[in-house]
Image (cartoon, rainbow, N blue to C red):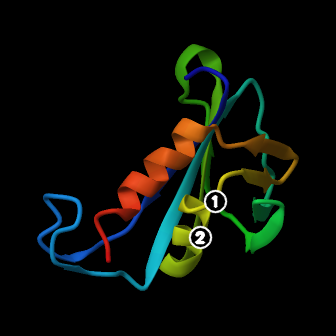
């Protein structure tokens, strides 16, 4: 990825999560990590974050800017941000039909395949 923002969600389950629907215990929280690659820094501080699920506000706060460097491919600036949310909110995002994310000056809608991938990730937890 040379330009754009990537979303990488993750959480830790207790139990055997090798198969969807296996016996696990739902986590308390999930982490949403963002990676930004651009010609110049997109974020100068901890940006505002809003996530809308089916046009309703599901999450509002700040994403923590972890680092910025010039180590991206092709001279791009790579920046990394993170936010922790409740697993209930993460599941709400995964169960939505439409998800819009506002991260600082950037706005993007998750594609149906992206939402389906989040839903599949949630299938590992009760």
Residue lying at 23% horizontally and 60% vertically, measured from the top left: 20
Viewer-side residue, 51 vs 56: 56
Q: Which image quarter holds the C terminus?
A: bottom left
Residue lying at 81% horizontally and 54% vertically, measured from the top left: 102
Residue 3 sits above or below residue 23 on the image = above
Relative horizontal placement of residue 72, taking residue 106 as reference (left or right): left
User: How many neighbours does mark 2 have within 10 angstroms: few (below 14), some (14-19), or many (20 or more)?
Assistant: some
Q: Position of residue 34 (x, y in %)?
A: 59, 50
Q: Quadrant of residue 49?
A: bottom right
Residue 45 sits above or below residue 58 on the image = above
Alpha carbon distance from label 2 to label 1: 6 Å
Q: Quadrant of residue 125?
A: bottom left
Tell whether label 1 touches label 2 (CB within 8 Å). Answer: yes
Relative horizontal placement of residue 68, taking residue 46 as reference (left or right): left
Viewer-side residue, 51 vs 7: 51
Secondary structure under badge 1?
Answer: loop
Residue lying at 76% horizontally and 60% vertically, measured from the top left: 54
Q: Position of residue 5 (x, y in %)?
A: 65, 38
Secondary structure under badge 2?
Answer: helix
Quickly name the residue at label 1. 96
User: How many neighbours does mark 1 have within 10 angstroms: few (below 14), some (14-19), or many (20 or more)?
Assistant: some
Residue 106 sits above or below residue 97 on the image = above
Residue 28 sits above or below residue 103 on the image = below
Quickly name the residue at label 2. 92
Q: Position of residue 6 (x, y in %)?
A: 58, 40
């Amino acid at each position: 990825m040379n330009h754009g923002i990537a979303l990488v969600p993750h959480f830790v389950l207790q139990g055997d999560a090798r198969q969807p629907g296996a016996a696990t215990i739902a986590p308390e929280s999930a982490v949403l990590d963002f990676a930004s690659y651009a010609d110049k820094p997109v974020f100068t501080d901890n940006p505002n974050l809003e996530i809308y699920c089916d046009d309703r506000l599901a999450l509002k706060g700040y994403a923590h800017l972890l680092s910025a460097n010039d180590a991206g491919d092709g001279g791009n600036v790579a920046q990394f941000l993170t936010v922790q949310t409740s697993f209930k909110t993460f599941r709400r995002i995964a169960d939505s039909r439409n998800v819009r994310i506002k991260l600082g000056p950037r706005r993007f809608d998750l594609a149906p395949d992206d939402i389906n991938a989040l839903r599949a990730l949630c299938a590992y937890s009760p």
